[in-house]
Amino acid sequence: QLQLVESGGGLVQPGGSLRLSCAASGFTFDYYQIGWFRQAPGKEREGVSCVSRSGGSTVYADSVKGRFTISRDNAKNMVYLQMNSLKPEDTAVYYCAADGGPWRGSSCLAKYVYDTWGQGTQVTVSS
């Protein structure tokens, strides 16, 4: 069965950094584009970043552009989200999701296009 598992979350001070990991199993990983999403209490799940099958194309939400970097290592079935200059507004549960369709460009930030989701990892940015 298709599975995604996030890790790397934790508590960090404003201005700090974290690297989230998304590990995939049960499917041909490089067939899927991968998105990172986040959901804060009382808010809808929102797209953060996406990466194409090869890793050659990426999309970022305006709120994280210049601070976050998405990458993937298909040989290891892993996708990463490097988060720098973290702000309290980044506090949320972060999820990765897989989509087997064509590269969507900016539409990859829409949560409804994904069928496979990880369980989430908590990121808390607080002083």
Image (cartoon, grey):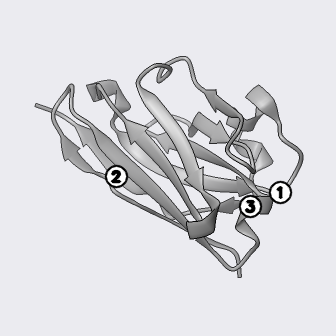
Q: Is residue 16 above or below residue 101?
A: above
Badge 1 or badge 3: first in the primary sequence: 3
- Residue 92 location, x and y as percent? 38, 41
The residues bearing labels 2 and 3 have C-alpha atoms spaced at a distance of 26 Å
Q: Is residue 41 visible?
A: no
Q: Is the residue marked by circle 3 packed among few (<14), some (14-19), or many (20+) residues within 10 Å?
A: some
* Front residue of this view, candidates 12 and 56: 56
- Residue 11 location, x and y as percent? 20, 46
**x 34%, y 52%: residue:** 122
Which residue carries the number 2 mark?
122
Contact flag, marks 2 and 3 (Cβ < 8 Å): no
Q: Is residue 84 visible?
A: yes
Q: Is residue 74 above or below residue 57?
A: below
**x 83%, y 57%: residue:** 100
Quarter that holds the C terminus: top left
Which residue carries the number 1 mark?
100
- Classify residue 112 as left or right of residue 95: right
- Nearer the observer, disc 1 or disc 3? 3
Quarter of the figure with residue 90: top left
Which residue carries the number 3 mark?
30
Badge 1 or badge 2: first in the primary sequence: 1
**x 83%, y 41%: residue:** 103
**x 58%, y 51%: residue:** 72
